[in-house]
Amino acid sequence: MNASDHIYVHVPFCNEKCAYCAFYSERIDPGEAHRYLDAVERELDELSDAAAPLTIYFGGGTPSILDTIGLARLCDALLRRVSTDRLVEWTVEANPGTLPDDKIKMLREMGVNRISLGAQTFNDAVLERIGRHHDAADIGRTLHAVRAGEIDNVGLDLIACLPGMSHAAWRSTLSAAVQLEPDHVSAYALSIESDSAFGRNGVTEPTDGATLSAIEAAEDILAASGYRRYEISNYAKTGRECTHNLSCWRGEDYLGFGPAAASRSGLRRWTNRPDTDAYSDALARGDPPPRAEEKLSVRSDAAERLVFAFRLSEGVPTDSLQHADAELAAHWFGTLERLAGERLVENSSGRWRLTRRGRTLADHIAGELLL
């Protein structure tokens, strides 16, 4: 695998910053969007002439907030620089209510074959409280419009434990989601980041008990409806797992474009500064975008890749742990044996995996595995 097998493009615009969000984004402005598109086209020139990605992912922000002409321009800029002969998945993140028929038609014709909808909840009062610009009915309308437009792989993102949402309301959200029969469901537990509106306003983290109950409800309801939990927060019908994200969790390299986008190639990692003005200005001058770069040690690289791999239900092959240096391998095996005694991990069929209980304590386990 090489880094250009998986390409991510960050679109840093939204209608408004949601109260829970700490990802880099800013309110969309037509002039700034035009400058961004100019800049990202120049950054895409870094791609090798031989680039033939397996996956493409447009994330944000909200890529679908670009108008049809702007989003078509972004798609075309990439298509003029890569071959799609090997492409198996092209995902575009979208918000309900931002995909009119002409935009869906354009995306399908460009080659997009997967849409990830940021539903978050089906509770209208909570949607308004967290700053969303759609209601629950928009979720279903948009999903049906996407499928009518012949993009048949659609996922929904949901957030558990949002303020004002009871456990019963969370179960109702899960039930409403499965009634729409999406191909994929992401069910994230709310975390309060200091630079989000929730963090600045002193909203407290949900209790461990509330989070555990919400995630257990998600697993039970989604499993009963035919969704397999293939990653800690992600569920899919058979064959509908997100290939792009799977590649990252499996330790494959990727290239990111746009402000705040991250890239990884071997032991090198770099991240564009989360500043659209600085990004656009630098590329307008003919300079590379401002970036933070680091060179990972062999040990830190191996440990980081292991932690990501443990997020997956497929687990980690036992023999792969032996490829690390002796001290690190000894630490891993000793830690895993201890965690197995605590019923947080298990070893079966030559692979280490998190148990159901272990999945609820994944961050703790990750800390234990890092040396």
Image (cartoon, grey):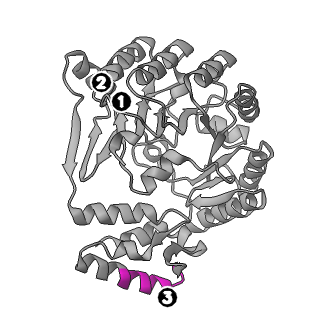
Instruction: Please name whichever residue, 8 or 343, is drawn nearer the observer in this view of the structure.
Output: 8
Which residue bears the numbered disc 2?
A: 45
Q: Along the horizontal axis of the image, is 154 left or right of 40?
A: right
Instruction: Tell me the CA gap for discs 1 and 2.
Output: 12 Å
Find numbered disc 3 in the image and state the secondary structure of the residue it sits on: helix
Residue 2 spot, x, y in % from top left: 34, 45
Q: Is residue 22 above or below residue 38?
A: below
At x 56%, y 47%, the residue is 242
Specify the segment rendered in magenta: 333-345
Q: CA distance from mark 1 to mark 3?
A: 45 Å
Q: Nearer the viewer, residue 131 or 300?
A: 300
Q: Amino acid at mark 1?
A: Gly
Q: Residues within 10 Å of mark 1 (few under 14, many from 20)?
A: many
Residue nearest the viewer, comparing 309 with 47: 47
Q: Looking at the picture, which amino acid does disc 2 mark?
A: Asp
Q: Which mark is residue 258?
A: 1
Picture quarter containing residue 363? bottom left
Q: Provide the residue designation for mark 3.
A: 341
Query: Magenta part mainly helix, strand or loop?
Result: helix
Depth order, front residue of 134/12: 12
